[in-house]
Image (tube, rainbow, N blue to C red):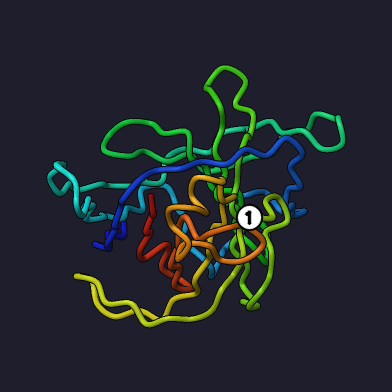
């Protein structure tokens, strides 16, 4: 089992949904795919320190463990498909987050419920980083650049994925500095290090 202590900084949570999902598939069974992107194996574990700056909430610790392989369902152009994925256990509780593997990418997917296990949102991490690349399942997720990140586990060179969210008329009037372009602002940043996992996540309110 591998364990790594990282950092998670949270101001507010947000979510996105995807109706039409394009899966990165492989001809090999998921157990035979050895990803250099994220060290996925049953029992691997990451520990995050979670803080809520400017709020009444106390710092927390979040443990993410890779669980058993599970079959998920997704829709593509109206057709129903199934694909294997690794489940995750967060703080000893099975979560709605899953990892899908293929030869050149890893997809972090979320399901809506445990009944039909249908994928409703996702984020894809590619082995070959490209600034400006847009996620195939969510045009609000864009790879922004490379940054050096310091955590309690050490220093990491990270690829930065930005989530852009629409700006409401009220936001535009009261927070003009938040506008990114085309009436969108950066609502979250995900810092990913090759061969480690997400090193840091920051959510903006």
Q: Where is residue 196 in the image (x, y as percent from the top left)?
A: 41, 68
**Residue at the extreme front:** 173
Is 45 positioned to the left or the right of 158 in the image? left
**Which residue corresponds to the image point at 39% horizontal and 54% vertical from the top-left?**
204
Eyeballing the image, is 145 above or below 20? below
- Residue linked to disc 1: 140
In this rendering, would 134 be left or right of 57?
right
**Residue drawn where x is 42% and y is 63% of the image:** 197
How many other residues sit within 10 Å of disc 1, few (<14), some (14-19) or many (≥20)? Answer: some
Residue 90: name its quadrant. Answer: top left
Dot 1 falls on a residue whose secondary structure is strand
**What residue lies at 52% left-to-right and 54% top-to-bottom?**
172
x, y percent for residue 105: 64, 62
**Which residue is more in the foreground, 44 or 182?**
182
Quarter of the image that includes the N terminus: bottom left
Q: Where is residue 133, by image quadrant?
A: bottom right
Left or right relative to 59: residue 132 = right
């Amino acid at each position: 089992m591998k364990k790594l202590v990282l950092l998670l900084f949270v101001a507010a949570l947000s979510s996105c949904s995807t109706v039409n999902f394009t899966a990165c598939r492989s001809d090999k069974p998921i157990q035979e795919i050895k990803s250099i992107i994220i060290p996925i194996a049953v029992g691997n574990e990451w520990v995050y320190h979670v803080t809520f700056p400017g709020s009444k909430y106390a710092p927390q610790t979040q443990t993410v463990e890779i669980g058993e392989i599970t079959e998920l369902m997704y829709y593509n152009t109206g057709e129903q498909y199934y694909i294997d994925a690794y489940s995750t256990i967060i703080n000893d509780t099975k979560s709605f987050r899953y990892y899908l593997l293929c030869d050149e990418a890893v997809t972090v997917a979320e399901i809506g419920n445990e009944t039909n296990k249908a994928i409703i949102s996702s984020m894809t991490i590619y082995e070959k980083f490209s600034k400006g690349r847009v996620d195939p399942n969510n045009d609000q997720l864009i790879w922004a650049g490379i940054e050096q990140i310091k955590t309690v586990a050490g220093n990491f060179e990270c690829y930065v994925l930005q989530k852009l969210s629409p700006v409401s008329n009220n936001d535009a009037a009261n927070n003009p500095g938040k506008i990114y372009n085309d009436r969108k602002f950066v609502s979250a940043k995900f810092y990913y290090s090759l061969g480690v996992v997400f090193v840091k996540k920051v959510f903006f309110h």
